[in-house]
Amino acid sequence: MTAVGGSTGPATGAGAAVAGAGPSAGRRLAGFVDRWLLRLFTIAAIGYLMVPILVMIVFSFNKPEGKFNFVWAQFSLDAWATPLNRPGLSDALWTSILVAIVGTFFATILGTLIALALVRYRFRGRNATNLFIFVPMATPEIVLGASLLTIFVSTATLEPFKSIIPSGIFYPLGLPTIIIAHIMFNISYVVVTVKARIQGFDRHLEEAAMDLGANEWTTFWKVTFPLIRPGIVAAALLAFSLSIDDFIVTNFTSGLVNTFPVWVWGTIRNNLPPQVHVIGTAIFLIAVGGVAFATWLQSRGGRTVAMRPR
Amino acid sequence: MSLLRSRRAIPYLLMAPGLLWLLLFFVIPNVQMLVFSLSEGTLRTGFTTPPDVWDIDNYTGSISRFSDNFSNSIVYGGLATILCFLIGYPLAYAIAFKGGRWKNLLLFLVIAPFFTSFLIRTISWKIILGNDGPALAVARDFLHLVPANFSIIGTPLAVVGGLTYQFLPFMVLPLYVSIEKVDRRLIEAAQDLYAGPWRRGGLVAGAIFGAFALVALQVGLGYGAFVGEDAAPAAVVAAGLIGAVGGGLVGAFLISQSFIRVTFPLSLPGVFAASILTFIPAIGDYVNPQLLGSPKTQMVGNVIQGRFLDQNDYPIAAALAFLLMAGILIAIFLYARLLGTEELTGGTA
């Protein structure tokens, strides 16, 4: 894990060194090609990553001729004026937001506790835990969703689950099962993100607090927590964005309840209104704004930690 | 003594709630899915679990019955991973070594797609690649590169393109971390020891790799069918030649000896980790083949979701999902044995 920004040295020196300082024409040509080709490539690759986002934003201003917002027809602000004017869309959006908030809250707490244990203590089974935490991230979402669906269905239909678990908790599927699933797949991401932050900080600060008479509880809240807070904020932002976006796991665990992505998946068989693009754009802008704000908050603290989804 | 003992329990107490959650909602569900995969029945008739005889019919049956979907998954996932690597490595290298003060912004732009919904990004590609979309408007109507009845949506090209786009950040970020860690002093040392450009070697290696990549793309995407059976071998040769020339140029001009002897070997663990992290979600996806493909390009994920959510055929679906999971566990296990767990898990010893 690398802390990005501030701590790393100037990269330009290495660039010049790679190009070589030799005087021959061939070398100079290679250096020229090296410098500009890579730069152009980087711009093109970043552009490639941005294109679908731009298409989404542009098509939120479209007034499609048919039922599907796939072909550009004419500029219109209609969809922006009535962003929720579709049956079920408003409910789905609020469900998404509720799931993301509740799921993020619990996943951040559970994940941060694991991260603290993994970095701060030496104990038997630590490496195994590191690997175990990684497995859910490496599991395809479809397997996460499918396995949860089997266990939820089992609680209603199969022994021994049927007699242990009161009916109605996990089946029929609904809001609780979506939230359970989102907490589950977010824990690992929180652990990895917070761990990266904790690894970087100086344990002597805690020892100093203890030497000055603070007990462990006070030390944690007065020293440790403020130091790792940027990592926790980054982890929570990441969990929130993964959660509000999630389609595959949610599709398996939502039953008849819709989140926004599940609603889109259902509607696209019959139509695709530009409202989908409007809400997608709004979520994108809010998310970017949130990250910009968090980065600004952290940079005021002096050091920044890159938010990494992996 | 009791104080010592209670202090020893602290890490376990901290981890207990989170690990319990993962046990209940990750481990047990997967075990239950394994049980389902060995049983028979449907949601309506009930399941015969646990089976009297451990019966692997669901596995053998589903492998032969859905072999097309399995091969689609592996081929499309593999091609998308190769393409992600070809795009992602130079990008990660540029950000890590030449990013300068733009580094944070570039990293932010790499993850920016995650701030929009996965589905909406795929819908965007459906718009771009559609029969009335901008890509064909340029290639077909303006440049006349492709025939009038040519379409991209519904072909393997669209599915692989969608997968490549969706999972490119999964390739770039681990690569960035591992390239960033390369000690710059080693590169300077190599240059002091007369490591220069790598003209001939780069030409040969680039040509071979480029030819291989393009032939793999061409064969994997099944473009023989587009140019007709007779012309197919010629098209493969042509693709190989184009790849060789392109790869050779890149190799001869851009790849220096210090890169091939120092930077690249040191970033190899990251290359493997990034490839695993890209390949896994790619082979399990069902959104891209559903929205961008045709019935012929359906992957294992489409079968699993259809069996689970539409047909309630849990035993077969569980067997398919478990095969996917087993393949991935084997890949992670091999990686961990060969290269250790650090690059993958971000853990430090």
Image (cartoon, rainbow, N blue to C red):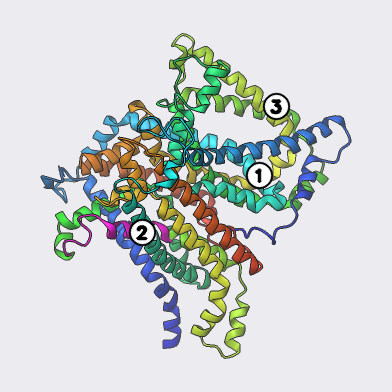
Q: Is residue A189 left or right of residue B99?
A: left
| Magenta-highlighted residues | A166-187
**How many angstroms separate mark 2 from mark 3 (CA)?**
51 Å
Q: Chain of mark 2?
A: A
Q: Give the percent coordinates (x, y) of residue A54.
A: 53, 40
Q: Is residue A240 left or right of residue B186?
A: left
N-term mark: 3 or 1 = 1
The answer to whether residue A174 is magenta is: yes
Please name the residue shown 47% across and 32% down the image: A74
Amino acid carrying mark 1 in the image: Tyr
* Circle 1 Cα neighbour tier, 10 Å, few/some/many (<14 / 14–19 / ≥20): many
Q: Give the percent coordinates (x, y) of residue B151.
A: 44, 21
Q: Which mark is residue B249?
A: 3
Please name the residue shown 56% across and 65% down the image: A197
Outermost residue on the right side: it is A23
Q: Chain of mark 3?
A: B
Q: Are marks 2 and 3 on the same chain?
A: no
Please name the residue shown 60% across and 89% down the image: A212
Question: Which residue does the numbered mark 1 point to in the structure image?
Answer: B93
* Circle 2 Cα neighbour tier, 10 Å, few/some/many (<14 / 14–19 / ≥20): many
Question: Which residue does the numbered mark 2 point to in the structure image?
Answer: A99
Amino acid carrying mark 3 in the image: Leu
Outermost residue on the bottom side: it is A213
Q: Secondary structure at mark 3?
A: helix
Q: Secondary structure at mark 2?
A: helix
Of tags 2 and 3, the one toward the viewer is 2
The one of B30 and B329 positioned closer to us in this rendering: B30
Q: Is residue A41 left or right of residue A238?
A: right
